[in-house]
Amino acid sequence: MNNTLSPNTITRIQTYLTQQRQEMLALLEKLVLVESPSLRPESQAGIQSILQAALKTLDYEVERIPGQTSGGQLYAAPQHLPADRPQQLLIGHCDTVWPVGTLKEMPLIMEENIVRGPGVYDMKAGLVQMIYALKAIQMLQLKTAVTPLIFINSDEEIGSIESTPHIRRLAKMVNRAFILEPALGPTGKLKTARKGVGQYEIVVHGRAAHAGLDPEKGVSAILEMAHIIQTLFALNEPETGVSVNVGIIEGGLQPNVIAPQSRAVVDVRVPTHEDAARIEQAILTLPSVLPDVTLTINGRINRPPLERTPANQALWQTAQSLGQRFGLTLDEGLAGGGSDGNTTSLYTATLDGLGAVGDGAHARHEFIYIDKWLERCTLLALLLLSPPAEQ
Ligand SMILES: [Zn+2]
């Protein structure tokens, strides 16, 4: 047992964070009041500056990685980085799904034990936890055996396209990764598994013809697509958790023209790497039914599944036993959506859903519970202080 985690230390962290409640709420308020939708890259500068200033008070060196299509990312490491120690990665995102102007209809509201507002739960509260867990460690002069590094991207809600190479590079270096995405459900389960997520586009090329004069000269891309849609929906497996949804279809020119083209966009969710490979293969090799049509199929599993690997489960057990030490009973759950934890888990022990407890991610009623938020911040500080996993 690492002696920095004596019962006294746990109490000191809890007391410190309880005293910081107002300051934490003030920082959360600032973060929520700068709207930061992923699709407006220029909107990220405001929130990144606030985060940068907060990280500097922790004696962290902050690097702003500019984006091409995204608002760019923040990477932060202690100013005096010990070379001989293992490292741990804290990951969060500062973008939200909410367009600029949302605050007008969905204002920030602070109640006795609840904070409401766009992006509060997913996941600006998690960013505050990250900063205050580190602040508790700093102010109480505790020592981490594993050096915390921070990565905050601004394109998570649109698939982390630009930030993923950085996340991969960091995940390969570290002993473990903690993801500050919101916890799961009303009891705040930690996310020890996430489905992999993919998207595919299918374009059917048929042949146009007059629907009245010579329909037999045409090949209907819409009829072909109707067959394909049936095949795709038949790939659903409720028992294993594989889901395939044709979410968009379009095509055709006029009612009196045999449709020369049709397009569909498909969302795929898979619990295991095996399912990912199998479903991907099935989609990319879809056979055509009608003669003389051609299919163009593009896409891939963009976020691989986060599976319950032995390393991930060991980290989850550490969290569970640390929770028990201050009366927090934790449960684990499977999330249907992906996160950057899906990526880190390919390379290092990963625990996800360490952020706030509340509800309404991407929904109008988005909120967090303040008391549970403080508890989760204590949990994060204890995790950061825990000894490295043997590798
Ligand atoms: Zn999120």
Image: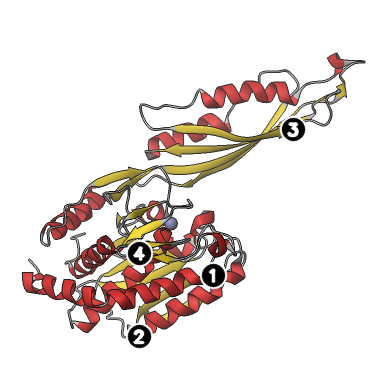
Q: To which residue does mark 4 refer?
A: 111
Residue 169 in view of the camera: no
Give residue 274's position: percent from left, percent from top: 39, 35
Give the image location of residue 165, x and y in percent: 48, 61
- Quick one: label 2 or label 4, which is nearer the N terminus? 2
For badge 3, the amino acid type reads: Gly
Q: What residue is drawn where x is 43% and y is 48%?
A: 338
Mark 2 Cβ and ligand 1 under 8 Å apart = no
Q: Which residue is mark 1?
A: 72
Rendered residue at 54%/62% (across/down)? 162
Q: Which residue is mark 3?
A: 251
Secondary structure category for the residue under label 4: loop
Looking at numbered disc 4 in the image, what kind of residue is underneath it? Glu
Q: Position of residue 71 (x, y in %)?
A: 57, 68
Q: Nearer the viewer, residue 253 or 315?
A: 253
Q: CA distance from mark 1 to mark 4?
A: 33 Å
Q: Quadrant of the N terminus?
A: bottom left
Which image quadrant for residue 3? bottom left
Task: Give the vertical position of 55 relative to 116 (above or below).
Answer: below
Mark-to-mark CA distance, 2 and 4: 28 Å
Q: Which mark is residue 57?
A: 2
Q: Label 1 is placed on what type of residue?
A: Gly
Location of residue 195 (image quadrant): top left
Query: How crowded is the residue under tag 1: few (<14 C-alpha within 10 Å), some, or many (20+)?
Result: many
The three-letter amino acid code for the residue at tag 2 is Thr
